[in-house]
Image (spheres, helix red, strand yellow):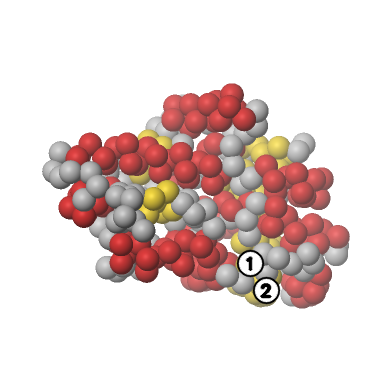
């Protein structure tokens, strides 16, 4: 299909399970895929098949480092974990747990739930019974609100942390007052008016947010940022690839992949990207911030 239509690159999909399923197809087609997904399984560990995949959000390791630092600073010693029972949740536990252990954070409960679940009461009760100082939720958007709400309903009083998957208006819309105080390590685009001038990607972030609001009348979702940044990456890489080969050919697609791997210091809506052959996400901590939910909106916490 790709060859028939001379497709040189694809942006999408936004779901981690769907992205994982596409890896062998994109490798066989030898066509770059720029995927706005959460899980880093698509690009780590790097191998020949994954060399055709580029992830347009920061890897879990970057966000995990920020979460661990925030927990340590706030005196967390014991932690409960609840995440999706799919590549997103599994990769998050695999990534976070060794970092937590290294920081002397003890995980005392480890639960899973499905994206289709309408209740996690049983998991919430088990988490509370373990008496953790805090709980980390590894879910996405509205689906991440479910464990938070039911932990609060069950009487949990500790801090509840979230991955960047929760950095969405849908999370607040579904969670309402019950997600007030949630702690989220996420992207700059949620607080464009609070971004420090020292952030090198501030201009790009503000431009994206303002453009999206003008077009749709709402703040952009995090996966919208991944799609936007995929466009920035292609706009940077295509001229270099086109200087070496003709678009619509296998040679161009290989050159495009190589050009994407060579991108340096590109300011995107989520931070700064430096790609390599081994790192097909390229983000560092320069786009990572700690947020909380206050009065029905995300607010920057200045560390």
Q: Between residues 16 and 121, which one lies in front from this camera angle?
A: 16
In the rendered view, does 179 fall on the left or right side of 33? Answer: right
Give the mark nearest the N terminus, 2 or 1.
1
- Look at 65% across and 51% down and name the residue there: 141
Q: Quadrant of residue 222?
A: top right
Residue highlighted by disc 2: 111
Q: Between residues 32 and 207, which one lies in front from this camera angle?
A: 32
In the rendered view, does 42 fall on the left or right side of 179? Answer: left
Q: Between residues 79 and 138, which one lies in front from this camera angle?
A: 138
Where, quadrant-wise, is the N terminus in this rendering? bottom left
Q: Position of residue 220 (x, y in %)?
A: 59, 37
- Look at 46% across and 52% down and name the residue there: 12
Q: Residues within 10 Å of mark 2 (few under 14, many from 20)?
A: some
Q: Position of residue 168 (x, y in %)?
A: 64, 45
- Look at 40% across and 43% down and name the residue there: 230
Q: Position of residue 129 (x, y in %)?
A: 79, 75
Kindly indicate whether the residue at mark 1 contacts the one at mark 2 (C-beta within 8 angstroms).
yes
In the rendered view, does 158 fall on the left or right side of 74? Answer: right
- Look at 69% across and 62% down and name the residue there: 134
Residue highlighted by disc 1: 83
Q: Residues within 10 Å of mark 1 (few under 14, many from 20)?
A: many
């Amino acid at each position: 299909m790709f060859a028939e239509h001379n497709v040189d690159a694809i942006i999408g999909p936004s779901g981690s399970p769907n992205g994982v399923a596409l890896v062998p197809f994109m490798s066989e087609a030898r066509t770059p895929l720029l995927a706005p997904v959460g899980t880093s399984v698509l690009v780590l560990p790097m191998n020949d098949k994954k060399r055709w995949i580029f992830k347009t959000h920061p890897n879990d390791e970057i966000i995990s480092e920020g979460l661990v630092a925030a927990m340590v600073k706030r005196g967390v010693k014991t932690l409960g974990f609840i995440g999706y029972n799919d590549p997103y949740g599994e990769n998050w536990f695999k990534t976070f747990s060794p970092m937590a252990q290294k920081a002397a954070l003890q995980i005392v409960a480890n639960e899973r739930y499905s994206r289709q679940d309408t209740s996690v009461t049983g998991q919430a009760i088990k988490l509370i019974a373990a008496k953790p100082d805090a709980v980390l939720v590894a879910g996405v958007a509205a689906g991440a609100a479910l464990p938070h709400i039911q932990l609060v309903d069950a009487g949990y009083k500790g801090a509840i942390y979230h991955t960047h998957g929760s950095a969405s208006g849908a999370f607040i819309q579904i969670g309402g007052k019950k997600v007030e105080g949630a702690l989220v390590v996420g992207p700059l685009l949620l607080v464009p008016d609070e971004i420090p001038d020292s952030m090198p990607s501030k201009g790009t972030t503000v431009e994206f947010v303002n453009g999206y609001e003008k077009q749709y009348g709402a703040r952009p979702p995090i996966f919208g940022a991944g799609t936007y940044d995929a466009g920035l990456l292609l706009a940077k890489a295509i001229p270099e690839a086109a200087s070496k080969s003709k678009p619509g050919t296998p040679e161009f697609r290989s050159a495009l992949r190589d050009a994407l791997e060579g991108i340096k210091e590109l300011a995107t809506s989520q931070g700064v990207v430096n790609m390599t052959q081994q790192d097909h996400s390229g983000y560092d901590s320069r786009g990572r911030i700690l947020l909380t939910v206050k009065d029905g909106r995300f607010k920057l916490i200045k560390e």
